[in-house]
Amino acid sequence: MNLPTKITVTRIVAIVIMIITLFVLSVIPGWQTIEIGNTGINLVFLIIFAFFVLASFTDYLDGHLARKNNQVTDLGKFLDPVADKLLINSLVIFLIAPSIFAPYIPGALGQVGFNMWCAIILVARDIVVDALRFIAASKGKVISANIFGKLKTVLEMVAIGVVLLNGFPFRYFDATWPAGLHIADFLVYLCTLASLLSGIIYVVQNRHVFKEDK
């Protein structure tokens, strides 16, 4: 196992630990009320945000090292997207109802987050694309990531980061938006739209994999 793959495996292990930690914290009263001053940012959410940034950086790092040192392996190709989806989708699901985990902010964090339909679209899109890749691989074909998929990932990361920080720094501009609409919400809807469109593009561009081989 080379260094890039070890970094990927470490990221997966760290994500699993994060998920377990979030579950444990969810049943322990008290941590939801830990607010940093009057910022409206939960301390634990800030720690999760720092972990999220670090994990996202290691995602770039392992890919960069693999290409630079010519260490691209089949195991790495398999594990890297698994780590990405585990990180993003677990946080998307966790952030469906942030008011449950940080109820100390009336009318703020409870309104900024991933609603159920956005989460369903984001997770379902990944399942469809992964199934498409599996079918293609069974036929000896490879479906590479395209610019739309990369754009979707970037928008998801930005939206998750902003939601974890309770809309910071964009919430300072929310007053200029229509009543009840947060810029963080707009970012969530934007990444959801990008995810849906990229999934449709993947299926349309690779519809040939559904044809039966003769």
Image (cartoon, rainbow, N blue to C red):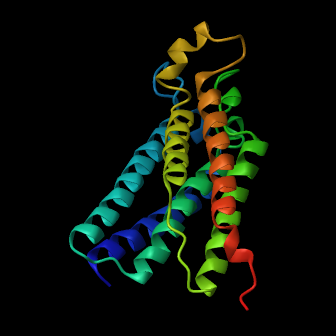
> Looking at the image, which residue is at 68% across and 31% down?
103
Q: Residue at x 67, y 40 (%)?
A: 193
Q: In the image as oriented, which residue stretches furthest toward the front?
A: 214
Report the residue at 54% width, 50% height from top: 148
Q: In which quadrant will I find the N terminus?
A: bottom left
| Image quarter of the C terminus | bottom right
Asked if residue 78 can be seen in this view, the reply is yes
Relative image position of residue 22 (x, y in whole percent)? 59, 54
Q: Is 119 placed above or below 2 here?
A: above
The residue at the point 53 percent across, 58 percent down is 87
Q: Nearer the viewer, residue 123 or 54?
A: 123
Indicate the position of residue 28 as horizontal and vertical percent values: 64, 49
Q: Is residue 4 left or right of residue 19?
A: left
The image shows residue 138, relative to residue 104, as above or below, that is below
Above or below, 113 relative to 72: above
Q: Residue 200 lies in what quarter of the image?
A: bottom right
Give the percent coordinates (x, y) of residue 125: 69, 57
